[in-house]
Image (tube, rainbow, N blue to C red):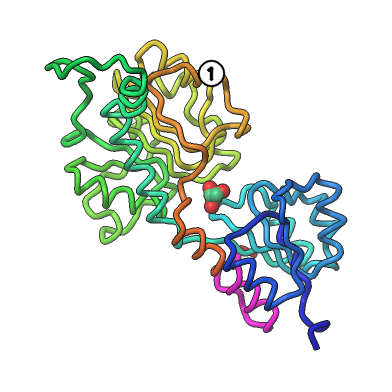
Amino acid sequence: MSEQRPKVLATRKFPADIEARLSSEYRATLNETDRIYPPEELVAAAREHDAVMCCPSERFSREVLEQVAGSIGIIATYSVGYEHIDVPAARDVGIVVTYTPDVLTDATADTAMLFILAAARRGAECDRFVRSGGWDRWHTLLMLGTHVSGKRLGILGMGRIGQALAKRARGFDMPVHYHNRRRLPPEQEQGATFHADPADLLAVSDFLSINCPSSPETVRFLNAERIEMLPEGAFVVNTARGNIVDDEALIAALRSGRVAAAGLDVFDNEPNLHPGYLDLDNVFMLPHVGSATHETRTAMGDTCLANLAAFFAGRPCPQALT
Ligand code: DGY
């Protein structure tokens, strides 16, 4: 009987309760050591299974998908981002791809708000200062920061996470501006100002939050030329993908003060980020933990399991991309 259960390859380590369910509902291959599969091993392992539950650390290019088609029927990625999967190619070879939207919206928007506040109030610098032992007294000019209330927040990418950030920012009395591929209806806009041209958004962004997916159109969006369009001393926050920022340009702007401070959760080529960030006091960094709450990571696993269950029951997958 158990031999009839589909075989699922879990490419990374997942929360214990999710792995327990994977093992009880499927013939699951878990990754106890969380070793990242080299591409050839990924293909070989996937071909031994009916489904893959993966993360953005695994790349499913057209070439890889063509090699695993006929073996696996579904790739359930444990992420809202899906730039690591060639979705049109998956469609062509008949592999269903699912992702985990919605469940990480609040955690990621909280992280963006944390960055806005930490960048404005010199969070990383203050923390280092206290730990250094150099703090000798309270004084009136110590570590003065910037008030966020009344400052304009520009949101690049007004999807679920952008809208959740806008809701938080309204609570801090920040006027919200945004650019998105399409203008939102008024009930979703909630008074935010739409800019059809991203250059117009940049011009009003005292704080710029990047919340768009990585795509050929957005890679290196925030380059030196666009940084010059920001107000002098603007703040930059990125909880989306590292490659949307041109690191050299942002580092130069943080060094000169053209950009006052930044909050970054994601980096190009992470975890091997550009070393230029490391000695900057005005950048608050996190190791790609925007969605890292117990609740969210479990909900992401539940979403993958629900999609696998639907697929193997012959029902449409609720979060299908293909
Ligand atoms: C996501 O879900 O896309 C997160 O960034 C984790 O990669």
Q: Residue 172: percent from the left, percent from the top? A: 19, 43
* Relative side of 84 to 127, left or right: right
* Relative side of 211 to 45, left or right: left
Q: Which residue is located at x 63 percent, y 79 percent?
A: 310
Q: Which residue is located at x 16 percent, y 15 percent?
A: 141
Q: Residue furthest top?
A: 256
* Relative side of 124 to 136, left or right: right
Name the amino acid, label 1.
Glu
Q: Which residue is located at x 69 percent, y 56 percent?
A: 88
Q: Which stretch is magenta?
A: 304-320
Residue 13: quadrant of the picture: bottom right
Residue 104: quadrant of the picture: bottom left
Q: Residue 55: percent from the left, percent from the top? A: 64, 53
Q: Residue furthest bottom?
A: 1
Query: Pointer 1: what residue?
Result: 248
Rendered position, 118 above or below 132: below
| Residue 113 lies in the magenta-colored region | no
Rendered position, 119 above or below 31: above
| Residue 319 lies in the magenta-colored region | yes
Q: Residue 205: percent from the left, percent from the top? A: 30, 31
Q: Is residue 229 visible?
A: no
10 Å neighbourhood of mark 1: few (<14), some, or many (≥20)?
Answer: some
Q: Nearer the viewer, residue 14 or 309?
A: 14
Q: Which residue is located at x 70 percent, y 52 percent?
A: 86
Q: Residue 263: percent from the left, percent from the top? A: 40, 32
Q: Nearer the viewer, residue 19 or 41?
A: 19
